[in-house]
Amino acid sequence: MKRIVTVVVCLALLCGCAQNTAAERHTKTVFAMDTVMELSLYGDEELLTGAENIISDAENRLSVTLPDSEIYRLNEKGHEKVSENTYALLKQALELCELTGGALDISIYPVVKAWGFTTDEHRVPNADVLHTLLQSVDYSKIDLQDENAVLLGDNMQIDLGSVAKGWLGDAILDHFRSNGVESAMLDLGGNVQALGAKPDGSPWRVAVTDPSGDGYAGVVEITDKAVITSGGYERYFEQDGVRYHHIIDPATGYPANSELLSVTVIGESGVTCDALSTALFVMGLDKAADFWKRNDGFEVIFITDNAICITEGLISVFSPLGKYENTEVVILHRD
Amino acid sequence: MTVYFGKKAVKLIDIIEEAQSANVDGISGATYSSNGLKNAVEDALGKASVK
Protein backbone atom coordinates (compact mmCIF):
# COMPACT_ATOMS: atom_id res chain seq x y z
CA MET A 1 0.00 0.00 0.00
CA LYS A 2 2.78 2.38 0.95
CA ARG A 3 4.45 1.72 -2.39
CA ILE A 4 1.26 2.51 -4.30
CA VAL A 5 0.94 5.81 -2.46
CA THR A 6 4.56 6.67 -3.33
CA VAL A 7 3.96 5.88 -7.00
CA VAL A 8 0.83 8.02 -7.06
CA VAL A 9 2.72 10.92 -5.42
CA CYS A 10 5.56 10.60 -7.95
CA LEU A 11 3.09 10.57 -10.85
CA ALA A 12 1.36 13.63 -9.45
CA LEU A 13 4.69 15.44 -9.20
CA LEU A 14 5.61 14.44 -12.75
CA CYS A 15 2.28 15.68 -14.07
CA GLY A 16 2.80 18.91 -12.16
CA CYS A 17 6.19 19.41 -13.78
CA ALA A 18 4.89 18.59 -17.24
CA GLN A 19 2.10 21.13 -16.84
CA ASN A 20 4.53 23.83 -15.76
CA THR A 21 6.78 23.40 -18.78
CA ALA A 22 3.76 23.44 -21.12
CA ALA A 23 2.61 26.79 -19.72
CA GLU A 24 5.76 28.86 -20.03
CA ARG A 25 5.64 32.59 -19.24
CA HIS A 26 5.90 34.96 -22.19
CA THR A 27 5.87 38.75 -22.02
CA LYS A 28 5.68 41.70 -24.39
CA THR A 29 5.91 45.49 -23.98
CA VAL A 30 3.81 47.61 -26.35
CA PHE A 31 3.75 51.42 -26.63
CA ALA A 32 0.21 52.46 -27.59
CA MET A 33 -2.55 54.92 -26.65
CA ASP A 34 0.11 57.30 -25.28
CA THR A 35 1.16 54.84 -22.61
CA VAL A 36 3.14 51.66 -21.96
CA MET A 37 1.48 48.24 -21.96
CA GLU A 38 2.97 45.08 -20.44
CA LEU A 39 1.38 41.80 -21.46
CA SER A 40 2.28 38.46 -19.90
CA LEU A 41 0.72 35.05 -20.31
CA TYR A 42 1.43 31.44 -19.45
CA GLY A 43 0.95 29.53 -22.70
CA ASP A 44 1.43 30.00 -26.44
CA GLU A 45 3.76 32.92 -27.18
CA GLU A 46 2.10 33.44 -30.58
CA LEU A 47 -1.03 34.75 -28.81
CA LEU A 48 0.93 37.90 -27.88
CA THR A 49 1.08 38.79 -31.58
CA GLY A 50 -2.70 38.48 -31.71
CA ALA A 51 -2.91 40.78 -28.67
CA GLU A 52 -0.70 43.34 -30.40
CA ASN A 53 -3.03 43.29 -33.39
CA ILE A 54 -6.02 43.87 -31.09
CA ILE A 55 -4.19 46.87 -29.57
CA SER A 56 -3.26 48.47 -32.90
CA ASP A 57 -6.75 47.86 -34.30
CA ALA A 58 -8.30 49.53 -31.21
CA GLU A 59 -5.91 52.48 -31.43
CA ASN A 60 -6.60 52.93 -35.15
CA ARG A 61 -10.37 52.97 -34.52
CA LEU A 62 -10.58 54.88 -31.23
CA SER A 63 -7.74 57.43 -31.24
CA VAL A 64 -8.87 61.06 -31.01
CA THR A 65 -5.68 62.28 -32.65
CA LEU A 66 -5.07 59.88 -35.58
CA PRO A 67 -6.71 61.63 -38.57
CA ASP A 68 -8.03 58.38 -40.02
CA SER A 69 -9.61 56.92 -36.88
CA GLU A 70 -13.36 56.40 -36.64
CA ILE A 71 -13.60 58.69 -33.61
CA TYR A 72 -11.53 61.40 -35.32
CA ARG A 73 -13.82 61.31 -38.37
CA LEU A 74 -16.89 61.29 -36.14
CA ASN A 75 -15.61 64.36 -34.29
CA GLU A 76 -14.77 66.16 -37.53
CA LYS A 77 -18.08 65.52 -39.30
CA GLY A 78 -20.48 65.14 -36.36
CA HIS A 79 -21.73 61.86 -37.80
CA GLU A 80 -20.10 58.64 -38.95
CA LYS A 81 -20.81 55.02 -39.66
CA VAL A 82 -18.50 53.09 -37.35
CA SER A 83 -17.40 49.47 -37.03
CA GLU A 84 -19.35 46.93 -35.01
CA ASN A 85 -16.75 46.97 -32.19
CA THR A 86 -16.67 50.76 -31.90
CA TYR A 87 -20.46 50.91 -31.92
CA ALA A 88 -20.67 48.28 -29.16
CA LEU A 89 -18.12 50.19 -27.03
CA LEU A 90 -20.00 53.48 -27.56
CA LYS A 91 -23.21 51.78 -26.42
CA GLN A 92 -21.50 50.43 -23.30
CA ALA A 93 -19.88 53.82 -22.60
CA LEU A 94 -23.21 55.65 -22.87
CA GLU A 95 -24.84 53.17 -20.47
CA LEU A 96 -22.07 53.92 -17.97
CA CYS A 97 -22.48 57.69 -18.45
CA GLU A 98 -26.18 57.20 -17.68
CA LEU A 99 -25.54 54.89 -14.71
CA THR A 100 -23.18 57.43 -13.14
CA GLY A 101 -25.58 60.33 -13.70
CA GLY A 102 -23.10 62.07 -15.98
CA ALA A 103 -20.14 61.97 -13.57
CA LEU A 104 -18.63 60.15 -16.54
CA ASP A 105 -19.31 62.00 -19.78
CA ILE A 106 -17.47 60.99 -22.97
CA SER A 107 -18.35 64.36 -24.54
CA ILE A 108 -16.13 66.29 -22.07
CA TYR A 109 -13.28 66.10 -24.62
CA PRO A 110 -13.37 69.75 -25.89
CA VAL A 111 -13.01 70.93 -22.26
CA VAL A 112 -10.06 68.58 -21.62
CA LYS A 113 -8.52 69.93 -24.83
CA ALA A 114 -8.97 73.54 -23.64
CA TRP A 115 -6.95 72.68 -20.52
CA GLY A 116 -4.17 71.40 -22.80
CA PHE A 117 -4.12 67.89 -21.37
CA THR A 118 -4.26 66.32 -24.81
CA THR A 119 -1.16 68.12 -26.09
CA ASP A 120 0.90 68.78 -22.93
CA GLU A 121 0.45 72.54 -23.59
CA HIS A 122 -1.23 73.14 -20.24
CA ARG A 123 -3.13 76.32 -19.37
CA VAL A 124 -6.08 77.42 -17.23
CA PRO A 125 -8.82 78.31 -19.71
CA ASN A 126 -10.79 81.53 -19.42
CA ALA A 127 -14.06 81.02 -17.48
CA ASP A 128 -16.14 82.28 -20.45
CA VAL A 129 -14.45 79.80 -22.75
CA LEU A 130 -15.25 76.97 -20.33
CA HIS A 131 -18.84 78.13 -20.01
CA THR A 132 -19.30 78.08 -23.79
CA LEU A 133 -17.62 74.70 -24.21
CA LEU A 134 -19.75 73.17 -21.44
CA GLN A 135 -22.92 74.01 -23.41
CA SER A 136 -22.05 71.21 -25.83
CA VAL A 137 -21.10 68.64 -23.17
CA ASP A 138 -24.01 66.20 -22.85
CA TYR A 139 -23.62 62.49 -23.52
CA SER A 140 -27.43 62.11 -23.80
CA LYS A 141 -27.32 64.01 -27.12
CA ILE A 142 -25.21 61.25 -28.72
CA ASP A 143 -27.55 59.30 -30.98
CA LEU A 144 -26.75 55.67 -31.79
CA GLN A 145 -28.75 54.94 -34.92
CA ASP A 146 -29.36 51.87 -37.10
CA GLU A 147 -26.57 50.19 -39.04
CA ASN A 148 -23.82 51.46 -36.72
CA ALA A 149 -24.41 55.11 -37.58
CA VAL A 150 -23.55 57.62 -34.84
CA LEU A 151 -24.75 61.22 -34.65
CA LEU A 152 -23.24 63.77 -32.26
CA GLY A 153 -24.90 66.85 -30.77
CA ASP A 154 -24.02 70.35 -32.07
CA ASN A 155 -20.33 71.29 -31.62
CA MET A 156 -19.79 68.03 -29.78
CA GLN A 157 -16.60 65.98 -29.75
CA ILE A 158 -16.09 62.74 -27.88
CA ASP A 159 -13.17 60.77 -26.47
CA LEU A 160 -13.38 57.15 -25.34
CA GLY A 161 -10.15 57.45 -23.31
CA SER A 162 -11.98 56.71 -20.07
CA VAL A 163 -13.16 53.29 -21.29
CA ALA A 164 -10.85 52.28 -24.17
CA LYS A 165 -8.09 50.64 -22.14
CA GLY A 166 -10.59 48.72 -20.01
CA TRP A 167 -12.30 47.50 -23.17
CA LEU A 168 -8.91 46.60 -24.63
CA GLY A 169 -7.99 44.55 -21.55
CA ASP A 170 -11.27 42.62 -21.80
CA ALA A 171 -10.70 41.97 -25.52
CA ILE A 172 -7.12 40.75 -25.03
CA LEU A 173 -8.08 38.44 -22.16
CA ASP A 174 -11.02 37.06 -24.22
CA HIS A 175 -8.54 36.30 -26.98
CA PHE A 176 -6.23 34.49 -24.54
CA ARG A 177 -9.09 32.63 -22.82
CA SER A 178 -10.68 31.40 -26.04
CA ASN A 179 -7.28 30.01 -27.04
CA GLY A 180 -6.91 27.94 -23.90
CA VAL A 181 -4.85 30.28 -21.69
CA GLU A 182 -5.67 29.89 -17.99
CA SER A 183 -3.26 32.41 -16.52
CA ALA A 184 -2.35 35.89 -17.79
CA MET A 185 -1.66 39.38 -16.44
CA LEU A 186 -1.94 42.73 -18.25
CA ASP A 187 -0.74 46.17 -17.20
CA LEU A 188 -2.17 48.65 -19.69
CA GLY A 189 -0.61 51.92 -18.51
CA GLY A 190 -1.56 51.29 -14.89
CA ASN A 191 -4.78 49.35 -15.61
CA VAL A 192 -4.19 45.85 -14.23
CA GLN A 193 -6.30 42.97 -15.57
CA ALA A 194 -5.78 39.32 -14.68
CA LEU A 195 -6.99 36.13 -16.29
CA GLY A 196 -7.42 33.26 -13.83
CA ALA A 197 -4.98 32.80 -10.97
CA LYS A 198 -1.22 32.38 -11.03
CA PRO A 199 -0.07 29.04 -12.49
CA ASP A 200 0.42 27.64 -8.96
CA GLY A 201 -3.25 28.42 -8.20
CA SER A 202 -2.57 31.31 -5.83
CA PRO A 203 -4.19 34.72 -6.44
CA TRP A 204 -2.33 37.56 -8.17
CA ARG A 205 -0.94 40.19 -5.81
CA VAL A 206 -1.68 43.64 -7.23
CA ALA A 207 -0.20 46.73 -5.58
CA VAL A 208 -2.07 50.04 -5.57
CA THR A 209 0.19 53.06 -6.12
CA ASP A 210 0.46 55.47 -3.18
CA PRO A 211 -1.00 58.64 -4.73
CA SER A 212 0.73 60.97 -2.29
CA GLY A 213 4.22 59.55 -2.13
CA ASP A 214 6.46 56.86 -3.46
CA GLY A 215 5.70 53.19 -3.39
CA TYR A 216 2.42 51.49 -2.61
CA ALA A 217 -0.62 52.24 -0.49
CA GLY A 218 -1.55 48.56 -0.31
CA VAL A 219 -1.82 45.20 -1.98
CA VAL A 220 -4.98 43.41 -3.09
CA GLU A 221 -5.14 39.71 -3.95
CA ILE A 222 -7.35 38.90 -6.93
CA THR A 223 -8.29 36.14 -9.39
CA ASP A 224 -9.91 36.86 -12.77
CA LYS A 225 -10.42 40.55 -12.04
CA ALA A 226 -9.57 44.03 -13.26
CA VAL A 227 -7.94 46.47 -10.82
CA ILE A 228 -8.24 49.96 -12.29
CA THR A 229 -7.21 53.24 -10.67
CA SER A 230 -7.99 56.88 -11.42
CA GLY A 231 -6.18 59.73 -9.74
CA GLY A 232 -4.90 63.18 -10.39
CA TYR A 233 -1.28 62.45 -9.52
CA GLU A 234 0.18 61.40 -12.91
CA ARG A 235 -1.10 64.05 -15.31
CA TYR A 236 -1.24 67.55 -13.86
CA PHE A 237 0.37 70.98 -13.94
CA GLU A 238 0.81 73.86 -11.51
CA GLN A 239 0.09 77.51 -12.19
CA ASP A 240 0.34 80.34 -9.64
CA GLY A 241 0.77 77.81 -6.88
CA VAL A 242 -2.39 75.85 -7.73
CA ARG A 243 -2.28 72.28 -8.93
CA TYR A 244 -4.63 71.30 -11.76
CA HIS A 245 -5.07 67.60 -12.63
CA HIS A 246 -6.55 66.05 -15.76
CA ILE A 247 -9.82 64.54 -14.46
CA ILE A 248 -12.36 67.19 -15.39
CA ASP A 249 -15.76 67.32 -13.67
CA PRO A 250 -18.35 67.54 -16.47
CA ALA A 251 -20.59 69.60 -14.16
CA THR A 252 -18.07 72.44 -13.72
CA GLY A 253 -15.43 72.17 -16.45
CA TYR A 254 -12.73 72.30 -13.74
CA PRO A 255 -10.61 69.45 -12.34
CA ALA A 256 -12.75 67.33 -9.99
CA ASN A 257 -12.32 68.83 -6.57
CA SER A 258 -12.68 66.42 -3.67
CA GLU A 259 -10.71 64.90 -0.82
CA LEU A 260 -9.96 61.85 -2.98
CA LEU A 261 -6.41 61.32 -4.22
CA SER A 262 -7.24 58.08 -6.01
CA VAL A 263 -10.02 55.60 -6.59
CA THR A 264 -9.37 51.95 -7.46
CA VAL A 265 -12.24 49.83 -8.78
CA ILE A 266 -12.04 46.03 -8.73
CA GLY A 267 -14.43 43.85 -10.70
CA GLU A 268 -14.82 41.41 -13.56
CA SER A 269 -15.38 43.84 -16.43
CA GLY A 270 -12.41 46.01 -17.40
CA VAL A 271 -14.56 48.51 -19.25
CA THR A 272 -16.89 48.96 -16.26
CA CYS A 273 -14.03 49.31 -13.77
CA ASP A 274 -12.28 51.81 -16.06
CA ALA A 275 -15.39 53.98 -16.41
CA LEU A 276 -16.32 53.74 -12.72
CA SER A 277 -12.86 54.67 -11.46
CA THR A 278 -13.13 58.00 -13.31
CA ALA A 279 -16.78 58.57 -12.36
CA LEU A 280 -16.29 57.79 -8.65
CA PHE A 281 -13.25 60.09 -8.54
CA VAL A 282 -15.39 62.89 -9.98
CA MET A 283 -18.24 62.18 -7.49
CA GLY A 284 -16.04 62.47 -4.39
CA LEU A 285 -16.10 60.07 -1.44
CA ASP A 286 -19.64 60.57 -0.10
CA LYS A 287 -21.50 60.34 -3.40
CA ALA A 288 -19.23 57.54 -4.60
CA ALA A 289 -19.89 55.51 -1.42
CA ASP A 290 -23.65 55.95 -2.00
CA PHE A 291 -23.24 54.89 -5.61
CA TRP A 292 -21.43 51.70 -4.52
CA LYS A 293 -24.22 50.90 -2.04
CA ARG A 294 -26.83 51.19 -4.79
CA ASN A 295 -24.91 49.12 -7.36
CA ASP A 296 -23.49 45.56 -7.37
CA GLY A 297 -20.61 43.76 -8.95
CA PHE A 298 -17.58 45.83 -7.96
CA GLU A 299 -15.46 46.78 -4.96
CA VAL A 300 -13.58 50.03 -4.35
CA ILE A 301 -10.45 51.35 -2.61
CA PHE A 302 -10.71 55.10 -1.88
CA ILE A 303 -7.51 56.88 -0.86
CA THR A 304 -7.37 60.33 0.73
CA ASP A 305 -4.33 62.12 2.10
CA ASN A 306 -4.55 60.41 5.47
CA ALA A 307 -6.90 57.46 5.14
CA ILE A 308 -7.89 54.44 3.13
CA CYS A 309 -11.51 53.43 2.80
CA ILE A 310 -12.40 50.02 1.31
CA THR A 311 -15.69 48.33 0.51
CA GLU A 312 -16.59 45.27 2.58
CA GLY A 313 -15.86 42.71 -0.17
CA LEU A 314 -12.15 43.55 0.10
CA ILE A 315 -11.74 42.94 3.84
CA SER A 316 -10.05 39.56 3.47
CA VAL A 317 -7.97 40.39 0.38
CA PHE A 318 -6.59 43.91 0.99
CA SER A 319 -3.55 44.83 3.11
CA PRO A 320 -2.40 48.44 3.55
CA LEU A 321 1.29 49.23 3.06
CA GLY A 322 3.77 52.05 3.59
CA LYS A 323 2.47 55.13 5.40
CA TYR A 324 -1.03 53.61 5.46
CA GLU A 325 0.14 50.50 7.32
CA ASN A 326 -0.40 52.10 10.71
CA THR A 327 -3.56 54.05 9.93
CA GLU A 328 -7.02 52.67 10.38
CA VAL A 329 -8.63 51.29 7.23
CA VAL A 330 -12.27 52.41 7.10
CA ILE A 331 -14.67 49.71 5.91
CA LEU A 332 -17.79 50.63 3.91
CA HIS A 333 -20.74 48.28 4.44
CA ARG A 334 -23.92 47.82 2.47
CA ASP A 335 -26.71 48.69 4.90
CA MET B 1 4.43 77.20 -14.80
CA THR B 2 5.81 73.79 -13.98
CA VAL B 3 4.88 70.73 -15.95
CA TYR B 4 5.27 67.32 -14.39
CA PHE B 5 5.55 64.10 -16.26
CA GLY B 6 4.49 61.83 -13.42
CA LYS B 7 6.47 59.98 -10.85
CA LYS B 8 5.90 56.61 -12.48
CA ALA B 9 7.70 57.72 -15.61
CA VAL B 10 10.56 59.36 -13.76
CA LYS B 11 11.01 56.55 -11.30
CA LEU B 12 10.22 53.58 -13.48
CA ILE B 13 13.38 51.72 -12.56
CA ASP B 14 12.88 52.29 -8.82
CA ILE B 15 9.33 51.02 -9.18
CA ILE B 16 10.37 47.87 -11.05
CA GLU B 17 12.92 47.13 -8.33
CA GLU B 18 10.36 47.78 -5.64
CA ALA B 19 7.83 45.50 -7.35
CA GLN B 20 10.40 42.73 -7.27
CA SER B 21 11.16 43.26 -3.61
CA ALA B 22 7.52 43.61 -2.45
CA ASN B 23 6.57 40.41 -4.25
CA VAL B 24 3.72 41.81 -6.33
CA ASP B 25 2.58 40.75 -9.78
CA GLY B 26 1.22 44.08 -10.99
CA ILE B 27 0.83 47.73 -9.99
CA SER B 28 -2.48 49.52 -10.44
CA GLY B 29 -2.17 53.28 -10.77
CA ALA B 30 -3.39 56.33 -12.64
CA THR B 31 -2.50 56.21 -16.32
CA TYR B 32 0.97 57.49 -17.04
CA SER B 33 2.00 58.98 -20.33
CA SER B 34 4.57 57.41 -22.62
CA ASN B 35 5.48 60.96 -23.67
CA GLY B 36 6.35 61.58 -20.04
CA LEU B 37 8.42 58.42 -20.00
CA LYS B 38 10.21 59.45 -23.19
CA ASN B 39 10.94 62.92 -21.82
CA ALA B 40 12.18 61.47 -18.54
CA VAL B 41 14.54 59.14 -20.39
CA GLU B 42 15.77 61.99 -22.62
CA ASP B 43 16.31 64.16 -19.52
CA ALA B 44 18.27 61.39 -17.88
CA LEU B 45 20.35 60.84 -21.03
CA GLY B 46 20.92 64.61 -21.33
CA LYS B 47 22.12 64.78 -17.72
CA ALA B 48 24.34 61.75 -18.27
CA SER B 49 25.99 63.30 -21.32
CA VAL B 50 26.65 66.58 -19.47
CA LYS B 51 28.59 64.66 -16.86
Image: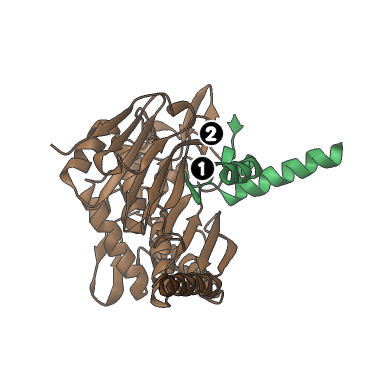
Chain colours: A brown, B green
Q: Which residue is mark 1?
A: A116
The subunit carrying tag 2 is: A
In-front residue for pair A33/A117: A33
- Residue A3 location, quadrant: bottom left
Q: Residue at x 40, y 44 (%)?
A: A220
Query: At label 1, which amino acid type do we have?
Result: Gly
Measure how far apart labels 1 and 2 are at the Cα level: 10 Å
Residue A248 quadrant? top left
Give the image location of residue A208, x and y in percent: 45, 41
Q: Chain of mark 1?
A: A
Q: Earlier in the sequence, mark 1 or mark 2?
A: 1
Which quadrant holds the N terminus of chain A? Answer: bottom left
Circle 1 crowding by C-alpha within 10 Å: few under 14, some 14–19, many from 20: some
Residue at image coords 58%, 64%:
A27
Q: What is the x, y in percent for residue A246?
A: 45, 40
- Taking the spot 51% from the left edge, 73% from the top edge, the residue there is A14
Check disc 2 and report the residue beneath it: A237
User: In this rendering, does residue A66 appear at all?
Assistant: no
Q: Relative to A147, is A223 above or below?
A: above
Q: Position of residue A152 (x, y in %)?
A: 30, 60
For the residues beneath circles 1 and 2, the answer to whether they share a chain is: yes
In the foreground, A293 or A283: A293
Q: Is residue A77 above or below residue A231?
A: below
Element under disc 1: loop
